[in-house]
Each structure stands twice: as C-alpha cells, then as structure tokens.
Image (cartoon, grey):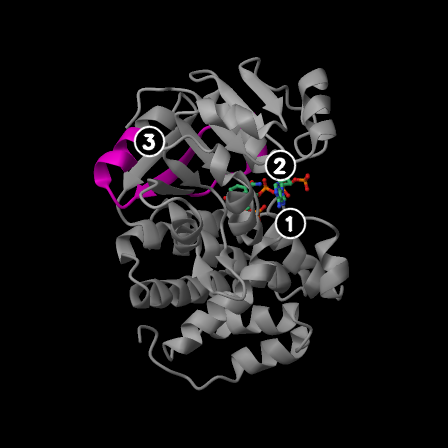
Amino acid sequence: MSQNGSVAVIGGGAWGTALANAVAGRHPVTLWLRDPEAAARIERGRENARYLPGVPLHPGIRATADAGALAAAGTVLLVTPAQTARAVIGQLKSHLPPGAPIVLCAKGIERGTDAFMSAVAAEALPVGTPVAVLSGPSFAADVARNLPTAVTLAAAEAGLAADLAHRLSGPTLRLYHTDDVRGVEIGGAGKNVLAIACGIVAGSGLGESARAALIARAFAELMRFARLYGGRPETLMGLSGLGDLVLTASSPQSRNFAFGERLGAGATPEAAAGGKLAEGAFTAAALVALARAQGLEMPIAEAVADIVAGAARVDAVVARLMARPLKGEVE
Ligand SMILES: NC(=O)C1=CN([C@@H]2O[C@H](COP(=O)(O)OP(=O)(O)OC[C@H]3O[C@@H](n4cnc5c(N)ncnc54)[C@H](OP(=O)(O)O)[C@@H]3O)[C@@H](O)[C@H]2O)C=CC1
Ligand SMILES: O=C(CO)COP(=O)(O)O
C-alpha cells in the first residue's frame, strides 16, 4: 500500500465528519462535500453544525467541495448513504488517486440491484481498485468526541485489511481486521433493518421482554442470511453484526431504532423518517429479496419491509409473527 498517509473522506454528514475527526490527529484529512457552501461554512466555523453540532473540527481537516483535492490522498473513505454510493463513485471516479484503497463506510444494500456495497464498488470503480469495508458499533457522536470505539475493517486481501486497520486506528478508535468482506457488510446492512424492528417493538409498547426476544431472533435471521451469502458466523458474532445490533437495537440514539419507534407509535413511514437517514428503510426490501431468492425465510426483516412499504400495519405484523408455527430454536 502507498506510504502516503493523507486521508480523503467523501461525504460530510455525521459519520464522514466523525471519521475525519477521529483520524485527523495522525493524518492530514480532506473532507469532501458536494455542496460548496456547506464546505465553506464548515471551514469557517470549524464545526459541522448541521450534522454534528457542538463538536469542534480537528485543525488537521480541510473541508472542500473541490473534487481535485481528492487526488492527493493515500486512502479514501466513502461515507455517503448506501443508495448514493454508485452515483457518487461515478461522479468522482476520475478524481480518485489511482491505486489508493477505497474504504466503504455505508451500511446498506443497493435497492433495485440488491447489490452489496463491495459489489457496487467493484462495478463502479476502475478495475483493480483495492476496496475495504468498515463497519461496527459506532455512533458518529461518540467517535467524533473521541469516546472509545471498536469497529471492523475488512478487505479480501488480509494484508491490506491489516495495513488499513493500523493506519486508521488511534487512541480512541480501534480497528480490528479480517478478510471476511461479505460477513462485515452483511452485519452492517442487516442490523439496520433489524434495529427498525426493535424500535417498532419499543414504540408500540410491547415491553422489554419482547424486545429481547426480538433481538435474539433477529440475530438468528442475520446468521442464517450470512451463512447463505458467504459471511462467516464468527464475523457476525463480532463487532459488525451482534455488536452493532446490540448498540442500535437498544438505543434511541440510533436513527434506525428511532425511526422504528415512531412507526410503532403510529407514524406513517414518511412522517417517521422525519428527514433523517434510516438506512434500514431502504435496505429492508433488498435484504428480503436476496433471502427469498435463496428460499430463506426472514420473518422479522419481512415484517419491517412490509411496514416500511405501507403494506402492513404494526399490530397485524405482530400477530403474524406470534402466529408462526412453533419450531425448534436452532433450525
Ligand atoms: N451516523 C452514524 O453514527 C454512522 C453512520 N454510518 C453509515 O454511514 C453512512 C452515512 O451516514 P451519515 O453520515 O450518518 O449520514 P448523514 O445523513 O449524516 O449524511 C449524509 C451525507 O452524505 C451526503 N450525500 C448524500 N447524497 C450524496 C450524493 N449523492 N453525493 C454526495 N454526497 C451525498 C450528504 O450531503 P448533503 O448534506 O449535501 O445532503 C451528507 O453530507 C450510512 O450508510 C450510515 O449507515 C455508519 C456508522 C455510524
Ligand atoms: O450504524 C450506526 C452505529 O453503529 C448508526 O446507526 P443509525 O444509522 O441507526 O443511527
């Protein structure tokens, strides 16, 4: 890998800004935003007041909307929502430094194509571009404030994964590494859908016992899905999977959980979204489509997909889940 230590972050939302802050102590960072005015505001105010209010921007970060500034980076983090990844790569491809690894930080599956982020990147990036996936339990607000956080970095080439993990880790952000790209991306994308289900249970007042049962059964679904699509069970039992599910299935700080909570309280999907990103709402249908294509049942993900599409009401879905035939716990 190149010895060039500078890092470019594409996407100046909550997660892009938090990651920029976390690595800026050790590397010069370019934070690229599509909106020149937003970039100028961040440069002037040294704060991303829209997405991470109250968190001072590290002095080593330069915010810009000039795509030409990406060319100097040794490592590029792609941190826009999953459904935009293909378009953003297409738009910026000619500015990306040749040979520099691209770290995919979005947690989702592309609607329409049902493609995982690594597949989208492989199609959209120049042939041979090294790609990695970063995922794990990490609220942007925690990472940006330098609270201790651990995530997983996956790349098909184990040496690249280890290099990137060392390069991006710091005193408060700890990256574990693996070559199980598919397992890590399934963990991140899948948990968002399942966190919505947990929010729905909380919002409809079904109780803590129901929520605990749901987390356990949701994780069983995720494991079955991962096994079918080539993710390793031990990866799913780690940070990107169980770790992230525990975080986002139990905290209103999670936008997916909060979205589900509002749905459970009776809001329409449009009202529940409230202008905030809930990746699971977009990924649910793709996750279910991939499962169905292999004859796999994912009753909890299916319930979320139906509710988000406005095709089922929460009470009907709960009754449907409880009426499923009894079966062995491990099947
Ligand atoms: N927030 C978190 O705690 C974590 C988030 N993630 C993942 O990171 C990804 C991004 O989330 P997050 O940063 O929180 O989202 P935000 O909603 O906070 O920010 C999204 C950012 O992406 C930009 N963007 C959207 N569409 C485009 C586009 N077509 N071209 C260029 N930029 C675009 C937005 O720009 P604009 O303002 O101009 O619309 C904005 O800067 C998601 O997949 C999420 O699951 C992962 C771990 C933690
Ligand atoms: O992925 C996250 C934490 O690991 C962020 O979760 P939300 O997108 O639900 O806020």
Q: Residue at x 49, y 65 (%)?
A: 113
Q: Earlier in the sequence, mark 3 or mark 1?
A: 3
On screen, residue 159 versus residue 236, left or right, reads: left
Residue at the disc numbered 1? 277
Question: Whole-Å distance between the Cαs marked 1 and 2?
Answer: 10 Å
Disc 1: residue Cβ within 8 A of ligand 1's nearest atom: yes
Residue 272: quadrant of the picture: bottom right
State if disc 1 and disc 3 touch (CB < 8 Å): no
- Residue drawn at point x = 40 percent, y = 20 percent: 171
Ligand 1 within 8 Å of the CB at mark 3: no
Q: Is 228 placed above or below 152 here?
A: below
User: In screen coordinates, is 97 left or right of 19?
Assistant: left
Q: Which tag, 2 or 3, sits closer to the chain's start? A: 2
Seen from the viewer's position, the closer of residues 171 and 323 is: 171
Q: Which residue is mark 3?
A: 164
Residue 237 covered by magenta stretch: no
| Secondary structure type for disc 3 | helix
Image quarter in which the C terminus is found? bottom left
Residue at 45%, 48% (x, y): give it: 244
Residue type marked 3: Leu
Q: Is mark 2 within 8 Å of ligand 1?
A: yes
Query: According to the image, label 2 marks what residue?
Result: 13
How crowded pointer 1 is (Cα within 10 Å; few <14, some 14-19, many 20+) is rated as few
Q: Are marks 1 and 2 in contact (CB under 8 Å)?
A: yes
> Which of disc 2 and disc 1 is earlier in sequence?
2
x then y, percent, for residue 251: 58, 47
Q: Secondary structure at mark 1?
A: loop
Mark 2 burial class by Cα count in 10 Å: few <14, some 14-19, many 20+? some
Q: Is residue 271 left or right of residue 183?
A: right
The magenta span reads 135-164
What residue do we see at 41% from left, 67% from top? 221
